Image: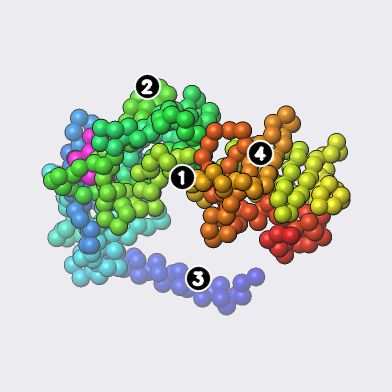
Amino acid sequence: MIDRRVRALLLIDGLLALALIASSLGGEGRSTIDFRLPPLAQIEGLRITRTGQPPVTLRRAGGRWSVQGDPIDPYALDALTEAMGDPVGADLAVPAEGAELDDYGLGEHAVTVAVDGGPTLRIGRVVDGRRTFVWPVDGPRILRLRADLGRVFHRPAAHWPDRRLAALDFADVAELTVSRGEALDWRARRPGPDAPWRLLHPPGLEAGQQEIGAVLGALVTARAERFVPPADGFEPTATLSGSTFDGGAFSIALAPGEGGTLRARLPERARLAVIPKHQAVFLDVRAADLRERRIFGGLAVDALDGVAIGGPDPLRAGRGPDGRWRLSAPRRTGPLSAPAVDGWLSALVGLRAVGFVERPDPAAFAEAWPVALKAGDVAVQIEVGAPFGNGARQVRRVGAEGPVMVLGASGLATLRPAIDALLGETPPGDQPPGR
């Protein structure tokens, strides 16, 4: 319970605040205010300036809004339409003379909006998320407009244009292609949104689903960090193009930018988009970057019923009729701890190559040791061959055409699980890297 004395003090504070507001407004706040900001449909253009930001010019032509000649961001347009769909009136006014403009968020660094054929306004502080203090520049009154104009105009200049590379969703894209100059680098296609990707070019290259998915993910989620004028001599080094399941097409020309960024020329855009480095690395990839890196392909953990590891630390494990896993080597024991074995099998199936051996030595597998995973009638076997530096080894799949991969030291440790941990006798966090 709030103490009576505290409650009384709060009440007095509230009354004083109301008295101050009433005294500052005088009688004008209660009178009809003859100001209306015209609705968006009657405005042909806006110019927005803000300290430390480049000016932004919005134009309407043919019922469509653009920003410096580029399409407007759909969220920015939604906010603008919601706030200014109807004429915007004021419900309060105070004299500007003698007012502390910064108290209303209307100081010299406030956002300034010049309406074509209309007023020039400073956009200030938002009250209760529904009203905004504005000042018609050099006018006699500060107004409180009945709209949240802060959500509309307190937006960085770079966020007014549509920053998407393409207006696409993951499920839209059926084909991806990268060309370099006149030469086709790679082409991938999938028959449906849930189907795996297949590399059509180069022929014979197994597609890495995660790798191609990363390209598509960057395409549909990447956002330009800024836009720059089209410089003379923009020469694309690659073109990322493709098609959608509904027959649409897209094409984006790419060229290296500063600090690992990419510059992109997008269709119907007046300026070049600058794509940040952390997204650019997934867009400008070569065919070799798309190779399947999963050591055991696409085996599912739940389908596994047998593991056999040879070499210096042999291990054999199988799932019994009761669904529990047991070891038959290096010693016969079990059942194994379900959480521990599930974690180990997930790591095993998820093993990925850290690289590829472009010119493998045939002797690298002269003394190889096998690792086999069995899932029903399907068995995938690899050979672990010679060292490849930094604790890594060369591996290849048995009975399948494919590259020689490099399995890193951490991946090799997965092939040597601690038996005590699998039995649940050692906390997983204390599990040593191997036996």
Alpha carbons under labels 1 and 2: distance apart? 41 Å
Q: Position of residue 268 (x, y in %)?
A: 23, 34
Tell which circle, 4 or 3, labels the residue nearer the N-terminal end: 3
Q: Which residue is mark 2?
A: 247
SS label for mark 4: strand
SS label for mark 2: loop
Q: Nearer the viewer, residue 17 or 302?
A: 302
Q: Amino acid at mark 2?
A: Gly
Alpha carbons under labels 4 and 3: distance apart? 79 Å
Labelled pair 1, 2 in contact (Cβ < 8 Å): no
Q: Amino acid at mark 1?
A: Arg
Q: How many C-alpha atoms fall within 10 Å of the one at disc 4: few (<14), some, or many (≥20)?
A: many
Residue segment shown in magenta: 266-273
Residue at coordinates 48% horizontally, 24% vertically from top-left?
191
Q: Amino acid at mark 4?
A: Gln
Whether the magenta-drawn stretch holds residue 226 is answered as no
Alpha carbons under labels 2 and 4: distance apart? 41 Å
Labelled pair 3, 1 in contact (Cβ < 8 Å): no
SS label for mark 1: loop
Tell which circle, 3 or 1, labels the residue nearer the N-terminal end: 3
Q: Amino acid at mark 3?
A: Leu
Q: Quadrant of residue 215?
A: top left
Q: Quadrant of residue 300?
A: top right
Please, is residue 240 above or below residue 340 in the view? above
Tell which circle, 2 or 3, labels the residue nearer the N-terminal end: 3
The numbered disc on residue 11 is: 3
Q: Nearer the viewer, residue 371 or 141?
A: 371
Residue at coordinates 16% horizontally, 47% vertically from top-left?
231
